[in-house]
Amino acid sequence: MVLFDCFADLGKILLLPQFGGLPQWAVVGDTFPLGCAFDESNVHHKYFAENPDSKNPIYSTKNGVYKEGCGLDSVYMSWGHDDYMYLVAKENKTTLPSAALFIVRYHSFYPLHKHGAYKHLMNKQDEEDIKWLHIFNKYDLYSKSKVHVDVAAVKPYYQSLIAKYFPEKLRW
């Protein structure tokens, strides 16, 4: 689970100059759907009133541009490290199961998995995959240890997992 937690957050490399040097606000933080009403459970919800989409007659409705039950893979999400790593994995034809990709893509979508917002956009597969995300959350945010890992000792194990689920050369 530790490796998966690291992988899910690896998209934070977008902060580094060699990977784009994006500002922190564009990489780290909660994610939320675009193209539909902003839910009150979105972090700093009061500031969404300044977003022009909140006044758009289509985007400001519950479903917005989506059909109820369309599936989260049909929903445009705010950009962040989650979507970046999801796209890297998908583009590199990972053999991770779909539930793992769901976790990578939506682990910062707290309005959904913590508050139950936007569930009306989910399909049956999303309902199955979110069960795995709830398990993953026990090992994610605020669950880090202060114990330093002996990298040399664990490196072969993690390299074998990377070799199992990803091609030899990754495209970033």
Image (spheres, rainbow, N blue to C red):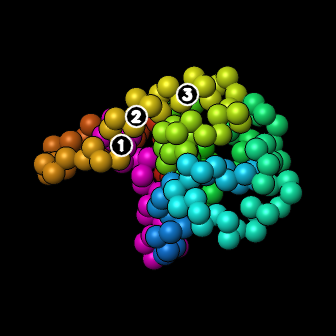
> Label 1 to label 3, Cα distance in Å?
16 Å
- At which x and y percent is residue 63? 78, 43
Under circle 2, the secondary element is: helix
Instruction: Tell me, for residue 129, which label it has, or none.
Output: 3
Residues under numbered marks 1 and 2 in contact, where contact means CB atoms less than 8 Å apart: yes
Under circle 3, the secondary element is: helix
- Residue type (three-letter) at the residue carrying disc 2: Phe
In this rendering, is residue 83 above or below 114?
A: below
> Label 1 to label 2, Cα distance in Å?
6 Å
- Residue 60: in sight, yes or no? yes
Q: Residue at x 53, y 61 (%)?
A: 44
Residue 91 magenta-drawn?
A: no
> Label 2 to label 3, Cα distance in Å?
11 Å
Q: Residue at x 15, y 51 (%)?
A: 146
Instruction: Tell me, for residue 33, which label it has, or none.
Output: none
Instruction: Tell me, for residue 140, which label it has, or none.
Output: 1
Task: Give the dominant element type of the magenta stretch: helix, strand or loop.
Answer: helix
The magenta stretch is 1-20
Question: Position of 15 compared to 127: left or right?
Answer: left
Question: Position of 92 compared to 7: left or right?
Answer: right
Query: Label 1 crowding class (10 Å Cα cut-off): few <14, some 14-19, many 20+?
Result: many
Q: Residue at x 82, y 37 (%)?
A: 67
- At which x and y percent is residue 29? 48, 58
In this rendering, is residue 25 above or below 67?
A: below
Residue receiving disc 2: 136
